[in-house]
Image: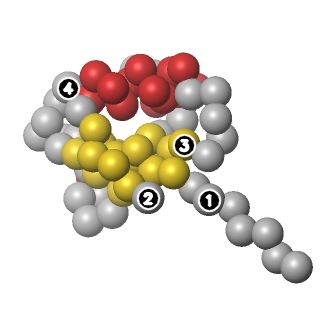
Amino acid sequence: MQININPFFAKIILRLNPFSKLLVMCKGYNEDYDNFTELVWRDDKNLDFYDKKNYPKFQLWFIKKIKLL
């Protein structure tokens, strides 16, 4: 599941994310405007989340793990 979120919430969720099933994704990271890239607080805490030109879109992804029988 993917949910579009604004930069403010992207930064807050990324910083406080206690769940491993939630991923904050960014379009435009490393100049990749076709795909979303996962953000990691340790590496991306200094990212300019409000730079709409370079980082036009953020999404929250929910990862569902499937159990195999």
Crowding at dot 4, Cα within 10 Å, few <14 / some 14-19 / many 20+, comes out as: few
Q: Residue furthest left?
A: 53
The amino acid at mark 4 is: Tyr
Q: Residue furthest front?
A: 69
Q: Nearer the viewer, residue 68 or 38?
A: 68
Please report whichever mark, 1 or 3, sits nearer to the chain's N-terminal start: 3
- Using residue 66 as the reference point, say whether residue 61 is left or right of it: left
Dot 1 corresponds to which residue?
A: 64
Crowding at dot 3, Cα within 10 Å, few <14 / some 14-19 / many 20+, comes out as: some
Query: What element does badge 2 sit on?
Result: loop
Disc 4 vs disc 1: Cβ atoms closer than 8 Å?
no
Residue 5 rendering spot, x and y as whole percentages = 28, 38
Q: Residue, x 18% and y 44% (percent of image)? A: 56
Please report whichever mark, 4 or 3, sits nearer to the chain's N-terminal start: 3
Above or below, 43 against 2 in this view is above
Q: Residue, x 56% and y 28% (percent of image)? A: 17
Separation of disc 2 and disc 4 at Cα? 24 Å
Dot 4 corresponds to which residue?
A: 50
Separation of disc 4 and disc 1 at Cα? 29 Å
Separation of disc 4 and disc 3 at Cα? 21 Å
Disc 3 vs disc 2: Cβ atoms closer than 8 Å?
no
Separation of disc 2 and disc 1 at Cα? 9 Å
Mark number, residue 1? 2
Q: Quadrant of the C terminus?
A: bottom right
Crowding at dot 1, Cα within 10 Å, few <14 / some 14-19 / many 20+, comes out as: few
Dot 3 corresponds to which residue?
A: 22
Separation of disc 1 and disc 3 at Cα? 9 Å
Question: Can I make out residue 47 in this image?
Answer: no
The amino acid at mark 3 is: Leu
Disc 2 vs disc 1: Cβ atoms closer than 8 Å?
yes
Query: What element does badge 3 sit on?
Result: strand
